[in-house]
Image (cartoon, grey):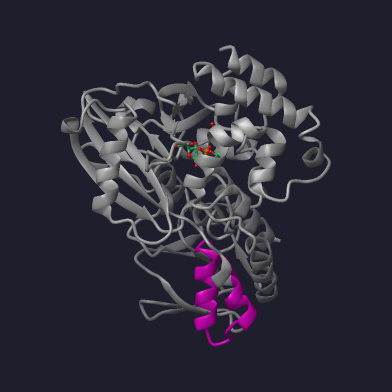
């Protein structure tokens, strides 16, 4: 029997191979597995491609991670995340921790919230589904939270105004506060347990890539090809052509390469794809994130694992600190940071590195530019999938075709969605279960 071919050895591809009960071939273009959880070590400092903190809900995945893949090797960490705005730090999430902000800002947030949830002003939005993400913010948080945090922060993160996006992605990721949470937060009695990542797991050694390596070590029943890329897929003949000249026949195909990338591969294959599917793939958009890996002399000045910066005078939307999360990620007396920039089009590494140093100093995360040991920019070409007007219909068009072609997709970019590491593992499991029959 022909094997199941899996494209991409990130978490979704590794998970597909793990759960398959049939022979598989895993094809990975890079020199090692892990996809976007490959950890880079620079002068003894460990950097993941921005924050990759593991939060798990599914009992089977928890069991696999903690007892099979990385037994006794995960540390549990209580989140310490903050917001830097109006010159002060408050705790994450903003909407339930406004204590410490200037009184007029707290007041605007509270009054806006009460109007939205109970007042006449919020009635129209309460009586129907939000049409876009801005309406979602106004419906569940009100005008003050929208103006003082949610709109400016999200505009920086997504590169478009929240009114240009739907709220289809928010799920568990954006907390919708209760009146008690908002009031307690304004009085300084907010809880630290709010949100999907109030605590998270992280490997004791080797950065988040340790998880991918552990999954690989545990794989059976197939073969991995590194430094290998598909160049076309003939879906009718069920064949994948590879850049090393080989052609693989498959009995099933699971792709975790980006959805537009998959459509391009199919379009280059002998069976082609309908024009409307190619057109749909061109309508899918994502932000590019450039993150700057920075090391600075001296221990962390701030306790924050990461901070959100809504104000436009900062170029970055968020700064994270691996050394603050887990001190084994940096040499003693060194603090490390990833400073994130979302963009469309080019942002040169030199410009991003310059912004990063400025943003770190101005946000009080480091004392002075003179303390910086290195600042190195890296780019994630597709980082956040844009849930704009085109998203739903374009993705549906492509998925209809893939179903017809008998191709399954998994992972954040394979599924073209906003999702977590656990979702990638679950996506792989779902594909494998379907193929196992
Ligand atoms: O105070 C706030 C801050 C943000 N939001 C909204 O929450 C959305 C999700 O934010 P976040 O959890 O930071 O999203 P992301 O998918 O980028 O998170 C990954 O990064 C780490 C960590 O956040 C940083 O390293 C996290 O563990 C990962 O899953 C955001 O879009 C805001 O709209 C809010 O409501 N209140």
Residue 263 in view in this figure: yes
Pick the front one: 212 or 23: 212
Pick the front one: 133 or 418: 133
Tell me where residue 369 sits by quadrant: top left
Give the residue displayed 45% in from the left and 28% down from the top: 85
Pick the front one: 149 or 401: 149
Q: Which residues are magenta?
A: 251-280
Give the residue displayed 67% in from the left and 28% down from the top: 112
Give the residue displayed 37% in from the left and 43% down from the top: 315
Coordinates of residue 72 in the picture (x, y in percent): 45, 28
Is 120 left, or right, of 320 in this rendering? right
Tell me where residue 172 sits by quadrant: top right
Q: Can you say whether 81 is above or below 35 in the image?
A: above
Quadrant location of the N terminus in the rendered image? bottom right
The reply to whether the magenta stretch includes residue 420 is no
Coordinates of residue 32 in the picture (x, y in percent): 35, 56
Residue 206 in view in this figure: no
Is 195 left, or right, of 126 in this rendering? left
Tell me where residue 302 sits by quadrant: top left
The reply to whether the magenta stretch includes residue 273 is yes
Q: Can you say whether 259 is above or below 49 in the image?
A: below
Coordinates of residue 317 in the picture (x, y in percent): 43, 40
Q: Can you say whether 309 is above or below 228 in the image?
A: above
Coordinates of residue 209 in the picture (x, y in percent): 39, 44
Is 152 left, or right, of 34 in this rendering? right
Q: Residue furthest bottom?
A: 270
Give the residue displayed 42% in from the left and 31% down from the top: 306
């Amino acid at each position: 029997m022909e094997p199941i071919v899996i494209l991409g050895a990130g978490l979704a591809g590794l998970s597909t191979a793990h759960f398959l009960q049939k022979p598989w071939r895993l094809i990975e273009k890079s020199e090692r597995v892990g996809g976007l959880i490959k950890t880079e070590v620079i002068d003894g400092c460990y950097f993941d491609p921005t924050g990759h903190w593991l939060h798990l809900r599914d009992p089977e995945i928890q069991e696999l991670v903690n007892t099979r893949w990385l037994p006794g090797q995960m540390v549990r960490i209580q989140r310490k995340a903050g917001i830097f705005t109006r010159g002060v730090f408050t705790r994450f999430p903003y909407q339930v921790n406004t204590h410490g902000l200037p009184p007029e800002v707290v007041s605007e947030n509270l009054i806006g919230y009460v109007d939205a949830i109970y007042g006449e002003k919020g009635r129209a939005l309460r009586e129907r589904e939000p049409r876009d993400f801005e309406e979602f913010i106004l419906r569940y948080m009100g005008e003050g939270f929208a103006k003082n945090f949610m709109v400016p922060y999200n505009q920086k993160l997504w590169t478009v105004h929240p009114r240009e996006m739907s709220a289809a992605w928010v799920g568990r990721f954006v907390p919708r506060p209760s009146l008690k949470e908002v009031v307690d937060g304004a009085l300084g009695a907010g809880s630290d347990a709010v949100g999907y990542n109030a605590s998270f797991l992280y490997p004791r050694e080797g950065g988040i890539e340790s998880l991918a390596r552990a999954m690989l070590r545990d794989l059976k029943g197939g073969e991995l090809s590194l430094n290998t890329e598909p160049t076309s897929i003939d879906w009718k003949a069920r064949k994948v052509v590879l850049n090393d000249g080989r052609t693989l026949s498959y009995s099933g195909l699971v792709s975790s390469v980006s959805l537009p990338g998959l459509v391009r591969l199919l379009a280059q294959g002998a069976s082609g794809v309908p024009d409307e599917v190619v057109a749909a793939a061109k309508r899918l958009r994502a932000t590019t994130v450039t993150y700057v890996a920075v090391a600075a002399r001296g221990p962390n000045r701030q306790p924050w694992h990461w901070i959100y910066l809504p104000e436009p005078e900062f170029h970055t939307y968020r700064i994270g600190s691996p050394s603050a999360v887990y001190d084994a990620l940096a040499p003693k007396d060194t603090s490390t940071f990833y400073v994130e920039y979302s963009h469309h089009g080019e942002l040169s590494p030199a410009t991003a590195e310059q912004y990063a140093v400025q943003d770190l100093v101005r946000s009080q995360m480091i004392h002075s530019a003179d303390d910086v040991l290195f600042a190195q920019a890296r780019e994630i070409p597709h980082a956040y999938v844009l849930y704009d007007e085109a998203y739903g219909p374009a993705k549906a068009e492509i998925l209809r075709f893939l179903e017809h072609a008998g191709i399954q997709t998994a992972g954040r970019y394979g599924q073209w969605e906003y999702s977590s590491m656990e979702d990638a593992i679950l996506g792989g499991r779902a594909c494998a279960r379907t193929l196992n029959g």
